[in-house]
Image (cartoon, rainbow, N blue to C red):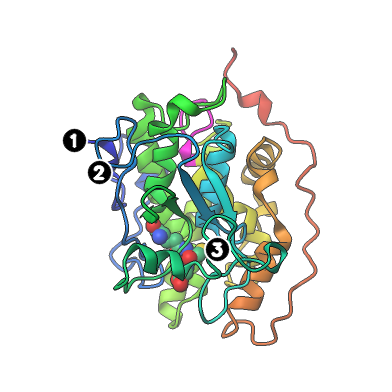
Amino acid sequence: MHHLLNIHAPRLPRQRGDDPLLSIHPGAGFVPSSQAARPTTLNSLITQDGSTGYAAEPGRYQLYASQACPWAHRALIARKVLGLERVIGLSLTDPIRDGNGWRFPASTGGADHVTGARYLSELYRATDPGYAGQFTIPCLWDTHSQRIVTNDVVQINVTMETEFRGFHRPGAPDLYPEELRPDIDAVSTLIFHAVDTGVYKAGLATSQAAYEDAFDTLFATLAALEERLSTRRYLVGGQLTEADVRLFPTLARFDAVYHTHFKCNLRRLTDYPNLWSYARDLYQQPGFGDTTDFGQIKRHYYQTQDWINPSGIVPKGPYVNWLSAHDRNRLSPPA
Ligand SMILES: N[C@@H](CCC(=O)N[C@@H](CS)C(=O)NCC(=O)O)C(=O)O
């Protein structure tokens, strides 16, 4: 079976050996809420051999993303780390989403330069006039058939990492190496449920119990990650992988948004020595810091989610020096 088919629906990780991180189980009360479930509805596959009708080829696909959205941020990181900027085009939406959903920014005349669309929803309707799902980013648009191929966040990254391998820049890291896939999938799935959607489950909770459940699981998982990163530079193996790409966008938003706006305030990222130096290590590598725009991130959350922040005021802080030195090189395995 094609490996992409196996990763479509993230399941809670199975226990893997005696890995303490994976002994955390989100628990029975930790069923993803409707806000946190993955609203994926389009999931055709782009393949290297073109057997699905969507061949991986340069210049054919356009990535639709926003620098504000953590799911889209993961796709932006992978595209850049792998050097696919000239292979897969990019259209960025405005960080502010209005009642009609994601729109293209005034700086580009309010229209997407590839399709002429003013709203992302137009691309979904062009794909399927009866489309009844959410108009989410990121998604990959096929300029040949004029359709969205996939809006599945996991699949988008794995597709870039595997099916587009022939177009990676020379020396690009293998973010999804065959032998590490079971560990990457297990760690990423835990991070998905407890951290990446955990902050949303806490922040968008409408009951005290749901908030506290998500909060407790989130901080138990961050504590385990802190421990794990005391002896390892990266989450899985001795190298940068997709698991790191999955965690980084949540860490980047943590102190600026989730700590305050989503009430995830047991600790700040900067209170965890290892997680904080790990996050800076990634930020200072190509593909991470250069796809992180704190201004857009803050405007998106504080000005779009008006039921949480009715005044729409965007906080000025915190002041956090992402460029300060880190000592993570000491954990790299010798070459
Ligand atoms: N389709 C994605 C979900 C990505 C997602 O939730 N994106 C958010 C932005 S951060 C979005 O576009 N939401 C639009 C909406 O809910 O209308 C998946 O496979 O999990």
Q: Residue shown at 39%/56% (left/top)?
A: 148
Which residue bears the numbered disc 3?
116
- How far separated are the C-alphas under marks 2 and 1? 7 Å
In the image, 325 versus 134, the foreground residue is 134
Disc 1 within 8 angstroms of ligand 1 (CB): no
Residue 154: x, y in percent?
39, 48
Q: Secondary structure at mark 1?
A: loop
Instruction: Check disc 2 and report the residue beneath it.
Output: 5
Question: Does residue 82 lie above or below 100 as drawn?
Answer: above
Q: Are marks 1 and 3 in contact (CB under 8 Å)?
A: no
Pick the quarter of the image with the N terminus: top left
Sequence-wise first label, 1 or 3: 1
Q: Secondary structure at mark 3?
A: loop
Q: Assess whether residue 241 is covered by the magenta stretch.
A: yes
Q: Which residue is mark 1?
A: 1
Chain part drawn in magenta: 236-243
Sequence order check: which comes first, mark 2 or mark 3?
A: 2
Q: Amino acid at mark 1?
A: Met
* Horizontal arrangement in the rendering, residue 205 relative to residue 302 (left or right): left
Q: From this viewpoint, which residue is outermost toward the left?
A: 1
Does the CB distance between marks 2 and 1 fall below 8 Å? yes
* Left or right of 205, for residue 4: left
Q: Amino acid at mark 2?
A: Leu
Estimate the x, y position of residue 329 in percent, counting from the top left.
67, 26
Q: Residue at x 29, y 49 (%)?
A: 44
